[in-house]
Amino acid sequence: METERGATMSPARGAQQNVPVCVPAPASLHLLRGPQTNRQATRPSAETRVLATSSMDTSEGEDNEEFLERLMGLTAQSLPHLELQEHYTVLKELGSGTYGNVLLVEHQERGSTLVLKLMPKEYTDLRAFLREYCIALCLSSHATCLRALPIAFESASHFAFAQELAPAGDLCALLNPGEGLPETQVKRCAAQLADALDFMHSKALVHRDVKLDNVMLFDQECQLVKLGDFGLTRLEGTPVCAMSGTLPYAPPELCLLEASETLELDSSLDVWAFGVLLFCLCTGCFPWDVAVSSDPQFEDFGSWQNSTVGREVPAPWQGFTAKAQEMFKRLLVLDPNRRSPAIEVHKYLLLPWKSSSHKELENAGD
């Protein structure tokens, strides 16, 4: 649950359009402009990093939140009404969850295939749909963000938008429990995801759901992976409440929130989840169940993280080289204000991550 800002905004609904196909959202919405410099220790405010498009720039003095509100309103005005079964044939269900379904479909007249993400109106309101769709479109210009297509519609029961197909599934399908990926593949994922997060953070956006399931594969060797599912993505500074269910990816500052407390979103939340994801890719398991002191694995990590000299490396981290341990400790700093930006992973890509003994075991299994 989150505290919404600008909740009074109610996008104007366009008149029902009796069209045989989905129509593009207004204008060309897939580009973002803004400062392209990497984040440093002192982060610029969200208001200084402005979302814009190639054909629809922000007005003078308009900040990110105002621009997104305007974009959502314009998109709502051109959202057509049609029924899925009248225009598309469902070929396969690619995924399902609390959000709805992801389907591979074929256009009945054109014969073209595409992926549709369907969100039931019973659980998704128009505003939530518009926000996810508009954010996804705006991020589509980046090579490692899953591309949304300028096709969206609503039916009597669902909202839907189209996105590109990731033919090899997601990272979950590639991992076996307790078995990490080869280091070369891990580093390919690390480099591309760091780029995707750096791009999002440069636009004052926080993904909020970085995890294996949301990293989409375009081949089995991870030559191309993309970060997807922007349903929880929000602007920096958005207040969020305590989590109803805790995940291993959640940082300690989020896990410690009481029911009545809120936390202002910051990109450091994504950096923590990114560090946990990289550990999973290397080992095939999570470093802890939950980032609180009552979890023994996290308690050991926290003590090691805070020690200056002489403390033994906790067992789950002993398979990494000293430089890889340094990288993880910088991504997983307990103080969110001191966490390194995700892009810093690039500094470690040419260095070995796994110790020689673990590499020997990995090679023996090949």
Image (cartoon, rainbow, N blue to C red):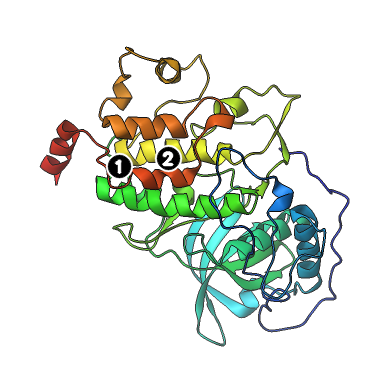
In the image, residue 1 above or below residue 227 = above
The residue drawn where x is 68% and y is 54% is 49
Nearer-the-camera pick, 244 or 267: 267
| Quarter assignment of residue 125 | bottom right
Residue 261, image x, y percentages? 74, 25
Of label 1 and label 2, which has the lower sequence position?
1
Q: Report the amino acid beneath label 1.
A: Asn
Q: Amino acid at mark 2?
A: Leu
Could you tell me residue 203's position as x and y percent? 63, 54
Neighbourhood count class around disc 1 (C-alpha, 10 Å): few under 14, some 14–19, many 20 upward: few
Quarter of image, res 256:
top right
Above or below for 119 versus 176 = below
Expressed as whole percent of the image width and height from the top left, the position of residue 309 reads 35, 14
Disc 2 element: helix
The reply to whether discs 1 and 2 touch (Cβ–Cβ < 8 Å) is no
> 167 and 322: which one is in front?
322
Q: Please tell me in which quadrant of the rendered image residue 268 appears.
A: top right
Can you tell which mark lies on residue 277? 2
Q: Is residue 272 left or right of residue 100?
A: left
User: Seen from this angle, which residue lies furthest bottom?
Assistant: 109
Q: Which residue is the site of mark 1?
A: 176
**Can residue 123 be seen at all in this image of the molecule?**
no
> In the image, which is nearer the foreground, mark 1 or mark 2?
2
Residue furthest to the top: 310
Residue at left 84%, top 68%?
A: 13
Rounded to the nearest angstrom, the CA distance separating label 1 from label 2 is 14 Å
Secondary structure under badge 1? Answer: loop
Closer to us: 91 or 269: 269
Quadrant location of the N terminus in the rendered image: top right
